[in-house]
Image: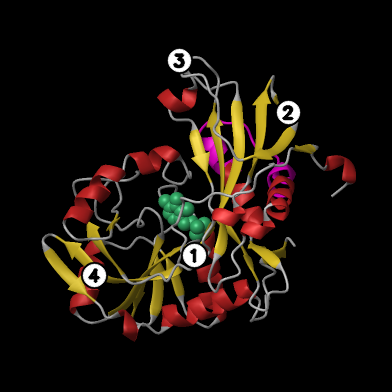
Amino acid sequence: MEASALPTITVEQTTVSKLPSIDFNNLAFGKTFSDHMFICEYYDGKWQTAKIQPYQNLSLSPACNVFHYGQAIFEGMKAYYKEDGSGVVLFRPEKNAERLNISAKRMSMPQVPIELFLVGLQQLIKLDKDFIPKTAGGSLYIRPFLIGTEPFIGVRTSDRYLFCIITGPTGSYYGDAISVLVYDSFIRSTKGGYGSAKAAGNYAGTLYPVELAKQKGYKDVLWLDGEHKKYVSEVGTMNIFFAIDGKLITPLSDGTILEGITRDSVITIAKDLGYEVEQRDISIDEIIEALEQNRLTEMFGTGTAAVVNPINRIGYHDKDYLLDEKTFVISQKIKERLVGIQKGTLEDKFNWVKQVI
Ligand SMILES: *Cc1c(COP(=O)(O)O)cnc(C)c1O
């Protein structure tokens, strides 16, 4: 990258750090934030000077598009110490920057220059490096987001935007096995919709059905496709994989699922470990039949937080189908390899891990 391509970022440091008040042995996800935030405004058809400033509330017109028509997209990633403590790294960060722009395009928002995203993030992490947990399994959770901020309540694309990155320390996430409920009354996305965008609206529409599932004792929802209500889609915060007859099967990325970076990494590692991976339509009937015949031996979700999260119970049409996650072999092997690459204890042959500090 040429020096001239680097964005200018002004830095205003905080005078009072929150650091002394943080209990690193007792971190709740998403409630603790670092001292600073990265912020860049877009107007007059271009990105303005970026700024790193003390973490603070935003001041926005109540007429902003984001409050009424939901032009809002986000990313989720983490920075963490390598196992030997030798440095702070990110996992495939350029993929998050690229995906933000894929989401932006679908939601009619401007592209965020990749270097603005990556350089801004790197500077922010460096400034708040003391917030990165050194405890085993801990990480700095990173939340970049882009919102429409033009003060205008007509229905059209906003001409003003805010790109922002906030971060916060999180403790170890164990990824205990979860239960999922399959609905044929609610859907998350359908072909031609925006299920493949990491858009706030995809979550807003699923909160109610997920709450109902929780009331019934399930941790989350396993969504079916919107058209036929027949093919499995994803878990809403995680992509889904099944092991049937020793092969891994995961739904196609057909525009209805979010294309997870963990999903892509899991597919690559599974193939590298010699497993067959099929990306295809997989019906809930095929899954139930394979479960009843004991041919379906593992099911798991994939996402940045838990990496690989076993699923031990599926509820469908008032029946529960159970698996014992302690018997899962393939997903365990994949998780060990992926976490080993992330932590720097195994060779990073795909060049996924990027040093920040
Ligand atoms: C973010 C997200 C995922 C997981 O993506 P990763 O890049 O692996 O973290 C899966 N599904 C949905 C709906 C998501 O928003």
For disc 2, the marked residue is 48
Q: Which of 356 and 310 is in front in this view?
A: 356
Real-space Cα separation, disc 3 to disc 4, in angstroms: 45 Å
For label 1, the residue is: 171
Q: Upstream in the sequence, badge 2 or badge 1?
A: 2
Q: How is the image coloured?
A: secondary structure
Q: Could you tell me which quadrant the C terminus lies in?
A: bottom right
- Determine whether the residue tagged by mark 1 lies in a helix, strand or loop: loop
Q: Earlier in the sequence, mark 4 or mark 2?
A: 2
Determine contact: label 3, label 1, CB under 8 Å.
no
Q: For the residue with label 4, is its CB less than 8 Å from the closest atom of ligand 1? A: no
Q: Position of residue 295 (x, y in %)?
A: 27, 81
Whichever of labels 3 and 1 marks the residue nearer the N terminus, that label is 3
Magenta residues (range): 101-118
Using the image, determine if residue 25 lies above or below residue 147: below
Mark 2 crowdedness (10 Å alpha carbons): few <14, some 14-19, many ≥20: some
Query: Which amino acid, mark 4?
Result: Arg
Q: Do the residues labelled 4 and 1 touch (CB within 8 Å)?
A: no
Seen from the viewer's position, the closer of residues 264 and 13 is 13
